[in-house]
Amino acid sequence: MKRTMLALRHVTRTFGDGESSITILDDLSFEVSEGEFVAVLGPSGSGKSTFLSIAGALLTPTEGEVVIDGQPLSGLNSQKLAGLRLNKIGFMFQSANLIPYLKVEEQLLFVAKLSGMDRREAQRRAGELLERLGLEKRRNYYPERLSGGEKQRTAIARAWMNRPAILLADEPTASLDSNRGQMIVRMIAEEVKAEKKAAVMVTHDERMLHYCDRVLHLEDGKLREA
Amino acid sequence: MFLSLREIRHAKARYALLLVIMLLLTFLVLFVTGLARGLAYANGSAIENMPVNYFMLQKDSDNRFSRSMLDQTQLNEARSRIGKDKMASLGIRMSTITVDGGSRKTDIAVFGVDMSGLLAPDVIQGSAVADTDEGKVVADRKLEQSGVKIGSTIKDQATGMSWKVAGFTSDASYSHAPVVFMNELEWSKLARTSSMPGGPAEGAFNAIAVKGDKAVLAEAAGTMTDVDLISKKTAIAGIPGYSAEQKSLTMMIAFLFIIAAFVLTVFSYVITIQKTGQFGVLKAIGVKTSYLAGSVLTQMLLLSCTSVAISLLLTWGMVQVLPASMPFSLKPAVIAFTSLLMIAVSAAGALISVIRVAKIDALDAIGRAV
Ligand SMILES: Nc1ncnc2c1ncn2[C@@H]1O[C@H](COP(=O)(O)OP(=O)(O)O)[C@@H](O)[C@H]1O
Ligand SMILES: [Mg+2]
């Protein structure tokens, strides 16, 4: 049996209260195992970001349970949740998610430092990730001097830096052209295999799915197999 | 530290600007403080440097030497109740003099004191004046700037009396005028010659300088005829012009602190608002709010400590080139207090930003096409 990296059990999320409340996620259940790269497809406004926020311990579900690498999230305070996001989850956002005043390598060293990784070990790991993602020549660049693709590659490297159980990516290709987008998706897929972890990518772009092991559709608050 | 330092490194111009603003404000605060202290000293150093801690004045004289008139009755009472070696009479008059027959006028303060008592001036040049000497005085050395030398003759404009300057003392100013010390003999003559109606009567003086325990002195004063006991600080504050001068300077300093607090708060807040997106991302990837708040605060403290250090250097440099006649005085305790207050003000200014950082939602990072 492969390890379950992320599980959502009967998750419901509503916004607003009383008559004006809308249900975005409706009794949704979902699991990702080790080595799996899952794509969640859905049109804009279907609740993809809401889904990812709940999976990423940024938003609490109205009902249901989230378990990350065996750890249920219910009952954890905000400090514990921050610690869990730091060590168990790697995030990638649409764009603009690098810290503008940190050089490429420092983006990685910073999260390693926060998680208490040994400095030499962090240096080694950063070097290895940057090399795999073709960024070794960019390690001393500020984000402002990187291309869109390089920025997202840096984001991938940072997301994997602390060896999280799972990488969560919210439309990571939205700000890139099709070719570059596909390269980013391929790199995420390669890292999932190399790290033996898991990843979930939400997107509304159907051209980005070649490298995914599983594709799900988010419709009416539920996930359906394609 | 990791974030604060690297951010300063990356946005050098922005932080240099903030640093310069803080530096100039701190420098200005230090400068005005030095000036205020210097003026206070120039105003009352003669009283300040007296080896006593209290003064007895006539009742209801509003803490002002000029409004107080005491005579031998009180002096005798004080002598018997406090002891001869712990008290001395003090006569004070403002006057205008000319030097060596010239026509240039100079304002002075005349102090009539017992030349063998507590208030006898320390002579640093020339010779002292004895209680029996006639027509001789000891002058503050600032009178040199008006052309007075040892042996010069100074002439009182109002009475026409003149005295020979036998010696110089230092650090003796009263109401911004250099002090001329004379013995009681000359003081009585001056009083007698003074034709002003209501002027000091023979044997009269303005105050009794006393030293000792407050309780003991207060008790003694209570049993004496028509006297009030005031502290040295109160007496200095009662020097004409002293309070008005210090109040306006203190107000300037207070305003500078308010301006500093305001500028720093706004600056730090604007920078923080600009970084809302970034803080959202940082929180999303698991950075704790306390770390971010610490980072904002550290940055402000780094800037304020640096600017305080540089402005201290600037102040020191300026003191070196200030003309000696410029009243300026900064004691280490005052410097330390001002510096710490400035650092505290900037930390307080960063506090609103910290609150703002705490309110930023990590969710802002996700699903936003910035
Ligand atoms: N905090 C919120 N309060 C109210 N409605 C929200 C909130 N967050 C998201 N929504 C709504 O939920 C729906 C899904 O949003 P989102 O998950 O961002 O969709 P997607 O990422 O698929 O575009 C949208 O209609 C949005 O308006
Ligand atoms: Mg979205």
Image (cartoon, coloured by chain):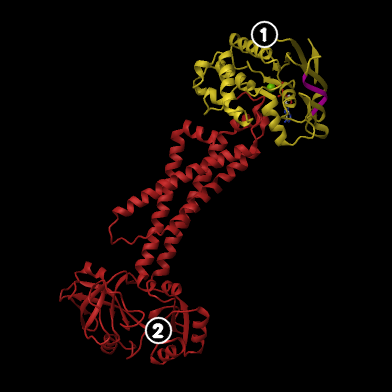
Q: Residue B70's spot in the image, x, y percent?
A: 40, 87
Tell us which disc is closer to us: 1 or 2.
2
What is the drawing colour of chain A?
yellow
Q: What residue type is labelled 1?
A: Arg
Q: How far apart are marks 1 and 2 (CA)?
A: 103 Å
- Horizontal placement of A7 versus B150: left or right? right
Q: Specify the amino acid type for callout 2.
A: Asp
Name the residue: 62% across, 19% down: A156
The secondary structure that most of the magenta stretch takes on is strand
Work out whether A196 lies above or below B241: above
Q: Quadrant of the C terminus of chain B?
A: top right
Question: In this picture, is A93 found above or below B26?
Answer: above
Determine whether the beta carbon of the residue marked 1 sits less than 8 angstroms from the nearest atom of ligand 1: no
Magenta-drawn stretch contains B333: no
- The answer to whether residue A96 of the structure is visible from this angle is no
Counting from the top left corner in percent of width and height, residue A20 is at 80, 32
Residue at mark 1: chain: A
Q: Does the magenta stretch include residue A5?
A: yes
Q: Can you tell which chain is drawn red?
A: B
Query: Quadrant where the N terminus of chain B lies?
Result: top right
Q: Is residue B31 above or below residue B357?
A: below
- Dots 1 and 2: beta carbons under 8 Å? no
Looking at the rendered structure, which numbered label has been put on residue A207? 1
Disc 2 target residue: B85
Q: Residue at x 41, y 78 (%)?
A: B64
Indicate left or right for B141 with B282 as reference: left
> Which chain does tag 2 point to?
B
Please state the extent of the stretch shown in magenta in the rendering.
A4-13
Q: Quadrant of ligand 2?
A: top right
